[in-house]
Image (spheres, helix red, strand yellow):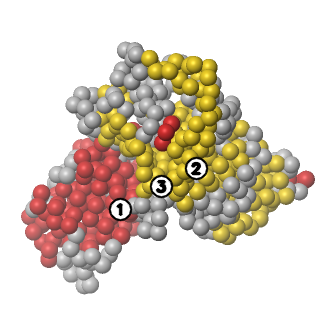
Amino acid sequence: MPTNVSQDAIELNIELLEAVEPSEETRPVPMLTRTGKFETREFQALTLENPYLRITTLPDLGGRILRIFDKRTGTDLLPFDPKLPLLTGGRRGVCCPAGIQVEVGRADRPNSMGTVASMPDYADDEEGPTAVWWGELDGEGISLNVRIHLPPDESRFEIEVRAFNRTLAALPYDGRLVLGLSGGSLIQNDHAFIWHEQDRAILLDSGGQMNHAALSNGRLSLHRFGFLRNLAPRQLDVWKVRISPYSGLGEFLAGTSQFALGIENGSLSLQSCQSVRRAKVVIQTVRGEVLDAPLDLDPAESTSLAMPESAHPLSGIVVLGPHREELLRWARSEEFAMSSSGADETAAHEPLHLGSDIATLQRGTFDVGHRHLAHTLLGYRALAAKNFEEASRAFEQALLFNAEDHLVWWAKAIAERHLDAGQEERPELLNAHYLAPLEPALRAESFLANPPQSKGKVKVLDPLEETPDAFIDVACHLLEMGLNEEASKWLDESLRHVDLPMLRYLLAYAYLRASRMEVEAGEMISAAGKLGFRPPYPWRTMEREALETLSKRFPDDELLGKYLTIVMPT
């Protein structure tokens, strides 16, 4: 069954509100006061439905998601009452805590209970829409376009928010997703936040884009930053949250964006958001016994495993995929409780570099001055992980903010080469050549894309012999991208053209980093030692990293130590 998008109406009993003159805080929209009079009214609803979930969005109430209904267990994940709850307070004097809302500034959106524009999204599936869009101009300069996507074969959905500063002045901003809940607990696991209560759980995974969460008075707020930052004039901020609802698991133990684990009446319960065949669960008891069982996980139903009495109490559980990759882990000793400390404003100004973690790089994609670098480094991470599609997307984003970086055009060409080896002429390389016709990386790409059949020198690289430092420079860029295999090929070929100590040191480093080839690395170190101390001398970050690593592995090599003193003087 594909995802079905329907446009209908829902009846809700709501207290009538009276609009009065705007206050300084609410301009240009009026203040609201409660009347104490109730009336049942129809509200426009957009419903996304697949075999597992039904997601109800109300364009007439600010685009909020009012219901997440788990069809597998007949459970509403969000508190739902046809009598819509209202609270005195908030920015306009009255607010509605129900459902999932998008916020962007200091407080609730002025239009959080008004009408937003909406439409189905046909972009992903020619057979029919799998998503809906809603959008608004909020009257304060930040416009919103929000996409809610429910894949046809998964029991999870994604909210994508595009917040755009339409003005020519900076505006205070902190993108937020606010969920109206009923008590429960909040824990954190890697980049995901997990709310759970009784046999229900909602996992919110932003891939590190949302950096702070708080649960207070039945409302869970997931923050882009946790404090106000400036959204620059005409700046667009895009963030996504993947929401995985789980229900009917009993006592919640652990979860990821794909799987959840619970225990009920002595039986282990697993719920999956997508189909996984030939999985395996491994259980360890506190007495050290290890039990395992094969699993076929299906998002249509929970998997229950009856546990023998001898298995209790449990010490740890691991769920493995068909290739024995780890999908989910729970250990009795692990604690994932949320820290009570607030958001760290200094994190907004962290410098970005090759060693930055994913969360830091994601934060960097917001800063206008750093976002090009942040997306570039995220692309490098994806290249190193051989996720070439993600790498190409990251480089595409980087080029939106700095289209004159010919090295990123080259990096994107590398990603595209791995995705489509048959394409001969790549527009990315044409762009790079236009920007920097003499860039040595372009000759390197010609070599890497068309490896020679013979063992002789590759003639297209002969011109680089006049400036031998170019061989080192290209090698360092390949190593920065995490392309160890391609760096090794390049360094092998480079040594056919010029024999330099730093080329041999970099090749030894590539051997150690990629495949722990200790013997081969040692041979490179020995060969470099015979060449003596001569230029080109090291100065690049990657050269320093290589020399540091090698000097720890080969501490008695005098020439290696001498080169290291150039980049790390005592």
Q: Residue at x 61, y 52 (%)?
A: 54
Foreground mark, 3 or 1, reads: 3
- Secondary element at tag 3: strand
- Secondary element at tag 1: loop
Circles 3, 2 touching at the beta carbon (< 8 Å) = no
Distance from Cα at disc 1 to Cα at disc 2: 42 Å
Q: Residue at x 55, y 38 (%)?
A: 100
Q: Identify the disc placed on residue 327.
A: none
Whether residue 345 sits left or right of residue 278 in the image: it is left
Q: Residues within 10 Å of mark 3 (few under 14, many from 20)?
A: many
At label 2, the amino acid type is: Ile
> Whole-percent x and y of residue 3?
55, 61
First in sequence: mark 1 vs mark 2:
2
The residue that disc 3 covers is: 131
Q: Residue at x 58, y 57 (%)?
A: 49
Instruction: Say which of 170 and 350 sits in front.
Output: 170
At label 1, the amino acid type is: Leu
Distance from Cα at disc 3 to Cα at disc 2: 10 Å
Q: Identify the disc placed on residue 483.
A: 1
Whether residue 293 sits left or right of residue 552 in the image: it is right
Distance from Cα at disc 3 to Cα at disc 1: 36 Å
Foreground mark, 1 or 2, reads: 2
Q: Could one spot residue 32 in this view of the protein?
A: yes
Query: Could you tell me which quadrant the N terminus lies in?
Result: bottom right
At label 3, the amino acid type is: Ala
Query: Could you tell me which quadrant the C terminus lies in?
Result: top left
> Whole-percent x and y of residue 315?
77, 47
Q: Residue at x 25, y 50 (%)?
A: 400
Whether residue 553 sits left or right of residue 325 in the image: it is left
Instruction: Say which of 463 and 448 sits in front.
Output: 448
Query: How many marks on residues?
Result: 3
The residue that disc 2 covers is: 55
